[in-house]
Image (cartoon, rainbow, N blue to C red):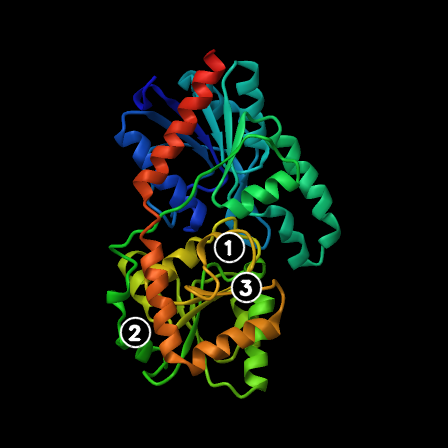
Amino acid sequence: MKISDLRIALVTGNYNMVRDGPTQALGRLVRFMLDEGAQVRIFAPTIDNPQVEQPGEIVPLPSFAIPGRSEYRIPLGLFGEAKENFEDFRPNIVHVASPDRASRQAAKWARGHGVPVLASVHTRFETYPQYYHLGFMQGAVEAWLRALYRKCDALVAPSDGMVDVLREQRMHRDIGIWSRGVNRDIFNSGVRDPALRHGIGIEDDEVAIGFLGRVVMEKGLPEFAETMKELQRRKVPHKVLVLGDGPAREWFSEQVPEARFAGYQTGDDLGRWVACMDMFFNPSITETFGNVTLEAMACGVPVVAARATGATTLVKDGVTGVLVTPGDTAGFADALQRYIEQPELRQEHGAAGEARSRLFDWDRINREMADTYLRLVMARQR
């Protein structure tokens, strides 16, 4: 069997609405499969003005906006015209990328028709409740995820650390790696542009601590803000460069008054802005990989991150950055202070990170995903 024999139905809650790590990975995968001759059809919610131009035929799923987070929509399910389109497509593999009702219905259809199901895990949903004072729900969310994942033939996760977490949670036995790559034409140290920094009030002799991503609580904003306050208490001079936007922006600007917001950026502009950071700070524990961490590394920016899934795969502690116990704001501040006070160390670790980023090649990564599809299809046929 060849890649061109595949008919892949991809069911996801976000394909082009918001630019984030999962949408980038899914778009790259779909483009690779189409270029190799496979047939791919995407079943996802749609909006009038999506943030991302994505390849492939998108079949709209009925959906509703998440209250308070209207940039995202939740599928109501796979039914009506969307279900007819799904069945007419006759997929020989179903890929579910979000644990919602539509994915569960697609998995149920596949099991009833002898079609294998692959689930890709893109974020640690079970960690989200703690950022909204609902930590008691974590066990229930894990059980809800397990109910879907155990109906699948296999899971893929983007890092060794996330595979370990899924095994500890007893989500599945067959769990592989679907890593992530980085576009080095966009992200590299040579695109740093001091004029961008000057335009938002960060001078050449000031050190900029970077944040990159959606400005939402689950990205570690409380830990980020508390760490900045600790640096202030220590009288360590710094600025904060924020790339991104989101519903918590006002809260973040109040908590971190030294922050300078460059807003939502894409493409070449994003690469130039990332390269303007002097260090990247990622205290989040919700990522399964951390595309933003890899993008910072590719730009020659040293990383301070929580010792959590994703970061442990990318960051070599003491070589390309520093890993700190999650939630240890004093430890985060210690690491950032060393980088602020030692520019030679920043340069050394940044260069090592840029070199390491070259290991993450999209074509090799997506060919391995194609091999996973083929393995599952042929196993089911046997």
What residue is disc 3 on?
283
Q: Residues within 10 Å of mark 3 (few under 14, many from 20)?
A: many
Q: Position of residue 250 (x, y in %)?
A: 54, 70
Q: What amino acid is found at the position of numbered circle 1 in the picture?
A: Thr
Q: What amino acid is found at the position of numbered circle 3 in the picture?
A: Pro
Q: Residues within 10 Å of mark 2 (few under 14, many from 20)?
A: some
User: Spatial distance from mark 1 to mark 3, Cα to Cα?
Assistant: 12 Å
Which circle, 2 or 1, is nearer the viewer?
1
> Which residue does the image show at 38% across and 62% down from the upper left?
296
Q: Residues within 10 Å of mark 1 (few under 14, many from 20)?
A: many
> Which residue does the image show at 37% across and 79% down from the upper left?
343
Which circle, 2 or 3, is nearer the viewer?
3
User: Spatial distance from mark 2 to mark 3, Cα to Cα?
Assistant: 25 Å
Quadrant in the picture for the N terminus: top left
Q: Which mark is residue 196?
A: 2
What residue is disc 1 on?
312
Q: Quadrant of residue 272?
A: bottom left
Which residue is most to the top?
A: 382
User: Which numbered disc, 1 or 3, marks the residue that appears first in the sequence?
Assistant: 3
